[in-house]
Amino acid sequence: MRDELDQIEAAFLGTPLAGLPVGYGPAGTVLVTDVDPDRLHEVWQAAEALVPVTGRRPVMVSDDFDDELTIRSESEQGPSESELRAFAEAAASSDPWLTYRHYSEDHQVDEDEIEFWARGTTGVDLTALASDVALPTPRPVLERVLYDRLLTDTDLHAEVLGKVRLVTSTDYWYTPDSVLLMLLPTSDVRSSAYWLDFFGALTTEDRQGLAEVLTQWRHRWDARLVASWGTMLQFQVGRRPTPGDEAWAAAGQLKALAPNLELSRWEVAVALPAGDAWFVHNRP
């Protein structure tokens, strides 16, 4: 098995990964240590470009809160091919949006709440845009009205965008003190969720749902998982949703997976067409 580590180190030559310590990780993974936290995205991009060579999908992880993420002297057995195939097949047949559904979907907005929900997290007040909405009404209905009308008001849209643009920038990303690159023993996007440690997917069934989310987002938006910090996921996005139905649908899915993302859905929908990074936050 040392031959594989030698091959990985050879593949790293001439990249930002060159010279970094490489060793065995848990459950068939390979770990690359001593990653500079300020270069984590650059290091991940180099590893992502090498997937056709290594056959391993990369994800940035941290040992700040996980003592299991240490280099081992011997390779540790991961799932069997049949086990991993069963996981991927179950994921492919799942409906992740039954597992992931934001609690606000069922909230009814009353007259005394309209200003609160129309103001948004960023403080831009859209109450005037909802003056003719019949109340009570489901919060998603109210937010869609606000979003559609916001798209027709150039100045107000620019004001909101100026406050939410950071959400789709890597500047917003969490950076732990200690960063490692984990190379998963698969190049398959769906199967890669088997190894992910994410608070929003603590059970096998939930990880299968997450696996299908990763697959759908990769197909639709070329969204590639960069980092998994336990309660946070960070994605690089190759195709931005366009304003309107696409951004609204993507914002709903992002909010469903990230209940602790402190923005209204209409704010997320404004932000998504303006950046190439998605941030997921799901914590106790």
Image (cartoon, rainbow, N blue to C red):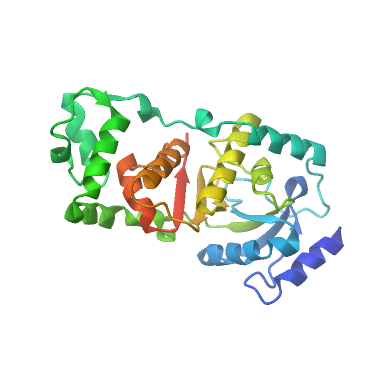
Q: Nearer the viewer, residue 158 or 167?
A: 158
Give how far across and how far down residue 241 sits, in percent. 41, 51
Quarter of the rendering occupied by the N terminus: bottom right
Judge whether 214 appears above or below 168 on screen. Answer: above
Q: Nearer the viewer, residue 24 or 125?
A: 125
The answer to whether residue 81 is left or right of residue 117 is right
Q: Nearer the viewer, residue 241 or 230?
A: 241
Please identify the residue farthest to the bottom as the structure is shown. 14
Judge whether 90 appears above or below 170 on screen. Answer: above
Task: Tell how many labels.
Answer: 0
The answer to whether residue 81 is left or right of residue 132 is right
Give how far across and how far down residue 3 sits, in percent. 86, 63
Instruction: Identify the residue at image location x=45%, y=49%.
Output: 279
Question: Is residue 62 shown to the viewer in this render?
Answer: yes
Question: Is residue 80 shown to the viewer in this render?
Answer: no
Give how far across and how far down residue 214 sits, in percent. 57, 45
The answer to whether residue 109 is left or right of residue 213 is left
Instruction: Identify the residue at image location x=76%, y=39%.
Output: 85
Instruction: Identify the residue at image location x=74%, y=70%.
Output: 11
The answer to whether residue 257 is left or right of residue 11 is left
Give how far across and how far down residue 176 sits, in percent. 52, 55
